[in-house]
Amino acid sequence: TIDLGEPSASIVTPADVNARRGHRPNRISTVRFPSPVILTWLPKSLFAQFMRVANVYFLGVSILVCMPFSPTAWSSTALPFACVLLWTALKDLYEDFRRRRDDTAENLRRCLRFDRESRRFVEIAWQEVLCGDV
């Protein structure tokens, strides 16, 4: 329910809807690796990579090549596979930093919000828009 009559009256029902998500219900975040990035990046990236059947297959092949009965050297299979995993993890990290930068730019975009007390529009950051604002 929205009421634009009395400024001191509750504008949004339920009144605690703006208290959710740390008083920033309009803030967007599309990052894959939440803070602290250094702790969450590698495990989440490797988990996402091993969701692919091809990576699980090559992991199995790399394990078999490391066994003593293997006719080929382990470095011919395991090292290229590890390099591919590391390269993909670094690419994921780079993309996540780009997402974080784009999210910050979007959240800091300026917009106009009607201030009921001064009866005029004021410029605020997009992340500061609350439920019930006009």
Image: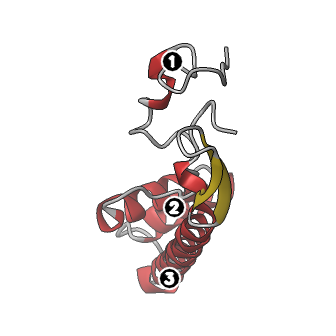
Q: CA distance from mark 2 to mark 3?
A: 12 Å
Q: Position of residue 76 (x, y in %)?
A: 51, 86
Image height of 64 relative to 74, above or below:
above
Q: Position of residue 105 (x, y in %)?
A: 59, 71
Q: Which residue is mark 1?
A: 9
Q: Which residue is mark 2?
A: 59
Q: Which residue is pictured at 50% across the width and 73% down the height?
A: 93
Q: CA distance from mark 2 to mark 1?
A: 62 Å
Of the numbered discs 2 and 1, the one sitting upstream in the chain is 1
Three-letter code for the amino acid on which mark 2 is drawn? Leu
Closer to us: mark 2 or mark 3? 3
**Closer to the camera, 22 or 69?**
22
Image height of 6 relative to 98, above or below:
above
**Closer to the camera, 42 or 85?**
42
Q: Position of residue 128 (x, y in %)?
A: 52, 50
Mark 2 Cα shell of 10 Å, populated few (<14), some (14-19), many (≥20):
some
**Closer to the camera, 49 or 71?**
49
Of the numbered discs 2 and 3, the one sitting upstream in the chain is 2
Three-letter code for the amino acid on which mark 3 is drawn? Cys
Q: Which mark is residue 83?
A: 3
Describe the element under mark 2 as helix, strand or loop.
Answer: helix
